[in-house]
Image: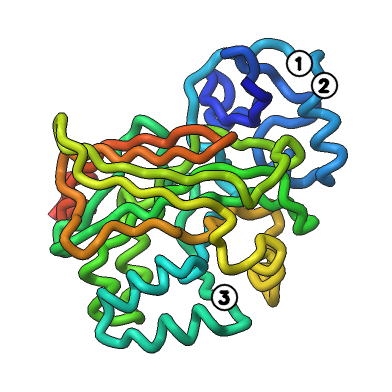
Amino acid sequence: MSLKIAVIATAENPFRCVTYKDSKFFSIEGVSTLTDALHMRADELRARVNDSSGKECFGTLQPPISPEIEIWGAGVTYLRSRDARKEESGVPDVYQRVYEADRPELFFKSHARRTVGTAHDIGIRADSAASVPEPEVAIVVNIYQEIIGLTICNDVTARTIEGENPLYLSQAKIYVGSTAMGPMITPIWDVDDIGTLGISAHITRGTELVWQAQTSLGALHRTFEDLVSYLFRCQIFPDGVILSTGTGIVPPLDISLEDGDVVTISVDEIGILSNRVVRIDENIHNLTLGIG
């Protein structure tokens, strides 16, 4: 297995940034969290990541993020995502125009507290009749706007809410359990040809395969560099940012996630992200805090 960048929870640090090789975690000199890593130039980080002198670390794998880093999303970046949005929406021309426009659709998606890693639960909203996974490749970007690595994001979406009105996008995409990311980060310098990376996903319900599909990053309508350029316009990301680059595989209208389903996303050279689905109650705020 090639070397990866990971985040683990240790007794001293719940967001310890480490390398992963030969089924073991190792420290990175001068790097405590992913935030530290994203304050470095890509060349400097590469040298430190490839340094084999790090000490072995022990902890539990976490999503590859730290508290200071935001996750943003890009939409309608594949032909399939354009078609899916048009199918589900009452205003389909909006998505055609976004697909063809110079300016991409970009939106805030999540942060560390709202993000789960592989083998943890994702959520479907109780007030949405249909919800779907959106398997995506996410790029990890440092403060110098350099891409340092790739990971996987499941941009879980309440399809019914998004389809009702484009202005409901944030409610459809930002809620408890709507973001899964991981399992680790593949350094960009270890990826030979980004365009050939295959992306596949499937939903299982008990022992039944409910849906599966595949695409590749070669079908991405926009370049990573273009997306990063627009993301940083009139914005400040003092600790770097993670940008999920959109999905090229969306389930058809007759497929919707159900409580207990398992969504598995695989991306060549990056890994496998797998999550069980749970239903998110409309009153989860009061239920969680024991108030109301």
Q: Identify the residue shown where x is 42% and y is 36%.
A: 273
Q: In this rendering, does residue 53 appear at all? A: yes
CA neighbours of label 2 inside 10 A, class few (<14), some (14 to 19), many (20+): few
Q: Callout 1: helix, strand or loop?
A: loop
Q: In this rendering, does residue 286 appear at all? A: no
Q: CA distance from mark 1 to mark 2?
A: 7 Å
Task: Residue 28: give x, y in percent of width and height.
Answer: 74, 24
Task: Residue 292: give x, y in percent of width and height.
Answer: 13, 55
| Residue type of the residue flagged with mark 2 | Asp
Name the residue that disc number 1 marks: 54
Check if mark 1's residue and mark 2's residue have beta carbons within 8 Å. yes
Q: Is residue 137 above or below residue 28?
A: below
Name the residue that disc number 3 marks: 104
Quarter that holds the N terminus = top right
Along the line of sight, the residue nearer the viewer: 236 or 233: 233
| Residue type of the residue flagged with mark 1 | Gly
Q: CA distance from mark 1 to mark 3?
A: 40 Å
Q: Identify the residue shown where x is 25% and y is 37%.
A: 262
Q: Callout 2: helix, strand or loop?
A: loop
Q: CA distance from mark 3 to mark 2?
A: 38 Å
Task: Residue 120: give x, y in percent of width and height.
Answer: 34, 34
First-in-chain label (3 vs 2): 2
Name the residue that disc number 2 marks: 51
Q: Is residue 150 above or below residue 190?
A: below
Along the line of sight, the residue nearer the viewer: 211 or 148: 211
| Residue type of the residue flagged with mark 3 | Pro
Is 229 on the left or on the right of 59, as rendered? right
Q: Callout 3: helix, strand or loop?
A: loop
